[in-house]
């Protein structure tokens, strides 16, 4: 059994094919935090950002849809 305490890994999983991706910052290796960004038109975009402010990326796509993030 793996302890769940401590660092949360951002794991994105495709609900269609089951592929999963671990997202970490390339600069500090920290697991990216899940976040949402409001864009023009009131839409929300799911993003991942570095907790140390190294930047953010859009959540990965698989099978034509956003991959869902589990922490
Ligand atoms: Zn997929
Ligand atoms: Zn970072």
Image (cartoon, grey):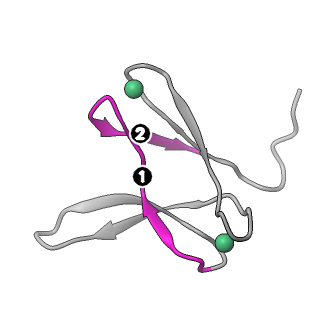
Residue reaching furthest to the bottom: 53
* Location of residue 15 in the rendering, given as x and y in whole percent from the top left corner: 41, 26
Give the residue pinned by disc 1: 59
Residue 8, compared with residue 43, is above or below; it is above
Circle 2 crowding by C-alpha within 10 Å: few under 14, some 14–19, many from 20: many
SS under mark 2: loop
* Location of residue 17 in the rendering, given as x and y in whole percent from the top left corner: 42, 19
Query: Residue at the location (22% across, 71% down)?
Result: 39
Q: Is residue 27 magenta?
A: no
Disc 2 and disc 1 in contact, CB within 8 angstroms: yes
Q: Is residue 19 left or right of residue 47?
A: right
Task: Indicate the quadrant where residue 50 lies.
Answer: bottom right
Which mark sits nearer the N-terminus, 2 or 1? Answer: 1
* Location of residue 44 in the rendering, given as x and y in whole percent from the top left corner: 26, 62
Alpha carbon distance from label 2 to label 1: 7 Å
Query: Residue at the location (55% across, 32% down)?
Result: 20
* Location of residue 8 in the rendering, given as x and y in whole percent from the top left corner: 71, 52
Image quadrant of ligand 2? bottom right
Residue reaching furthest to the left: 41
Query: Residue at the location (74% across, 62% down)?
Result: 29
Q: Is residue 7 left or right of residue 63?
A: right
Q: Is residue 41 left or right of residue 27?
A: left
Give the residue pinned by disc 2: 67
Residue 22, compared with residue 26, is above or below; it is above
Circle 1 crowding by C-alpha within 10 Å: few under 14, some 14–19, many from 20: many
Q: State the extent of the magenta-drawn residues as a range.
A: 53-71
Query: Residue at the location (48% across, 69% down)?
Result: 56
Q: Mark 2 near ligand 1 (CB under 8 Å)?
A: yes
Q: Which mark is residue 68?
A: none
Q: Is residue 68 magenta?
A: yes
Task: Indicate the quadrant where residue 16 lies.
Answer: top left
């Amino acid at each position: 059994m793996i302890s769940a305490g401590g660092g949360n890994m951002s794991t994105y999983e495709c609900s269609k094919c089951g592929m999963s991706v671990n997202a970490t910052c390339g600069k500090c290796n920290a697991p990216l935090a899940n976040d949402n960004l409001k864009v023009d038109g009131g839409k929300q975009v799911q993003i991942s950002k570095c907790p140390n402010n190294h930047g953010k990326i859009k959540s990965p796509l698989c099978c034509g849809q956003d991959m869902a993030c589990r922490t």
